[in-house]
Amino acid sequence: MKILLAGDSTVANCPTEEYPMSGWGAELPRHVFTWTAVHNFAKGGASTESFREEGLWGGLRVITEAGDAVVLQFGHNDQKLGHLGATTGYTDNLKRMISGGRERGAQVVLCTSVERRNFVEGAKQATLTDYANAVRLLSDEEQLPHIDLSAWTTDLYVTAGETGSTA
């Protein structure tokens, strides 16, 4: 079994010159069984559309086998493109990826976007609510597990506060 990650910079292995910045996918291998390989296809700046257009999705699918886990987390860059609205292009692209993962016999897992660290006058401001809600709805519709990174990171930022969350 392999874990295959598809996403943007919040999932990606960041270049050395960007250390200590890191996507969560870069940290995952040390938290899974040693016999489970983690293949991180995530790329900074990727949207659900560019991930496919640049061949990253095709490369991921080539090595996907029955029983693998395909984990999808996008939204940050989709949000910047009008045609990839939460309930339109973004959801449509995720559905294509879900179908493609299932065709290869993989278990697809959806993740809501990592929330942006955004405070206004000391109060945490939500930035990806529509995209997180779209993933939650799609998870129910497609009967897939999802990991709510949006809720988790929001709680993390709120608990740490504006100053404490800079670390």
Image (spheres, rainbow, N blue to C red):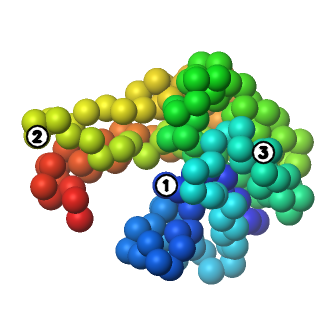
Where does residue 89 sit, x and y in percent of width and height?
68, 24
Q: Would you say the residues marked 1 and 2 are in contact, meaning their CB atoms lie under 8 Å apart? A: no
Where does residue 58 sit, x and y in percent of width and height?
85, 52
The circle on residue 122 is 2
Please say whether residue 75 is visible from this viewpoint.
no
Q: Amino acid at mark 2?
A: Gly
Compare marks 3 and 2 and give the one earlier in the sequence: 3
Q: Amino acid at mark 1?
A: Thr
The circle on residue 52 is 3
To which residue does mark 1 refer? 10
Q: Would you say the residues marked 1 and 3 are in contact, meaning their CB atoms lie under 8 Å apart? A: no
Where does residue 44 sit, x and y in percent of width and height?
57, 56
**In the picture shown, does residue 33 fall above or below 146?**
below
Residue 49 versus residue 96: which sits nearer the camera?
49
Q: Which residue appears at 63% of the width and 27% of the height?
A: 84
In the image, taking residue 84 as reference, residue 17 lies left or right, namely left
> Is disc 1 placed on a helix, strand or loop?
loop
Q: Which residue appears at 15% of the width and 58% of the height?
A: 164
Q: Residue furthest top?
A: 87
